[in-house]
Amino acid sequence: MRELPHYTSTSPAVSVLMVVRDAETSVRRAVESVQNQTLKNVELVVVDAGSEDSTARQLDAISERDLRVVVVHAGRCSRQEGLDLALERSRGAWFTVIDADGWARPTMLADLLERAEGHSADLVVGGFSLALIEGAGRSSEITVEAEGRDYPTQHDFRADAWRLFGSGQLLPASAKLFSRERAEERGARFAPAEGGPAEDDHAFVISYLRDVERVSVLPGACYHVVRRLPAGGQGLEGAWYRRLEGEHAALLGLYRHWGLEGDAASMETLQSRYIEQLVDCVEDVCRVGAPIDSAQRRKIVEGMLGTDQARVAASVARPGGSHARSLLAPIRARNTALVCAQARLLSLFRRGRVVESTIPDTFI
């Protein structure tokens, strides 16, 4: 493992990490949202992961005018590899992550840092808003935020973490402030250690949370992202479903590490979260227009419902979304034919991927 650079009194207070690829229409707004922060002692480390449009040229032009912006041309690499590279090149005692299709409220970094220093926190959790735009142009929006609160001990945080997991606020790396020292102590990295799938930033956050001591929650939403969904479904029956299985296992492992695998509220929240996302996967397989026939569809769904994780989750979960609730009984009965029929019907009534009926951190 390569060591992170040591920070000094002249280093930036906060480093912002970003990985981009072919983001010419949105990257300038994202970068300017960092440049225009009320906290000026910051740096932005942007890794260009092989852009073929004007993204790299825009970034180079910006960095020539603002020495706080560091551009790394890394060639084709995954988002997680790029974030690790950005972290290695950064120098701040604290760091956060933003995306090329997101932007920060002008006071975000100042507010996060004040919360961290004023409350002696190892992690500050902010809120975010998410707009999802599907191919036809329809959009769904949700804001994920909580009241300000502090968890001065591990026990306080762990006992209440299920609320933040349940809302979708805890797993994204964006809208948070991480301690470089703590990340280095834990060996936390964005890219998977053993060549596993690198779909999102959640594995890094789970690793960071394992032994975090003090956590503070910043009230309100400080980060905003607009995410365009690919037309014709999300392909959840493949990579997204595998990510769900791996992430759910990692969350259960985190709670075992915390000694809370028997906590009823925590387990109900995690299992409900899993069922909500599993239903999204099933709906995507069964939707009208999916490129598979009925026999393939049934085989895929049968495999999803037949796992130990699905059986345990279905027995415990109390999902909040109406689609998940309507499918819970046939899922518990492992009635694949009925699940497929109902999921296909439900997909006809869903107007795009309505974010209110699913877990927002699926997309951020």
Image (cartoon, rainbow, N blue to C red):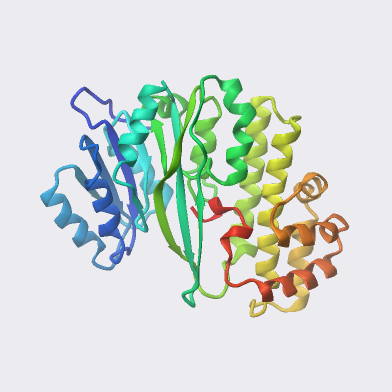
Where does residue 170 sit, x and y in percent of width and height?
Answer: 53, 40
Q: Please name the residue shown 43% across and 47% down the image.
A: 80
Where does residue 349 sit, x and y in percent of width and height?
Answer: 67, 74
Where does residue 235 sit, x and y in percent of width and height?
Answer: 59, 67
| Figure check: 59 above or below 191 | below
Please state the total of marks drawn on the protein image. Answer: 0
In front: 301, or 343? 343
Q: Please name the residue shown 66% across and 61% down the image.
A: 280
Where does residue 65 sit, x and y in percent of width and height?
Answer: 11, 50
Quadrant holding the N terminus: top left
- Compared across the picture, whether 124 is left or right of 69 comes to right
In this orientation, does residue 140 appear? yes
In this orientation, does residue 198 appear? no
- Compared across the picture, whether 146 is left or right of 181 comes to right
Res 270 quadrant in image? top right
Residue lying farthest to the left in this orientation: 65
In front: 186, or 271? 271
Q: Please name the residue shown 46% across and 33% down the image.
A: 188
| Figure check: 131 above or below 96 | below
| Figure check: 191 above or below 122 | below
Q: Please name the residue shown 41% across and 20% down the image.
A: 120
Res 93 quadrant in image? top left
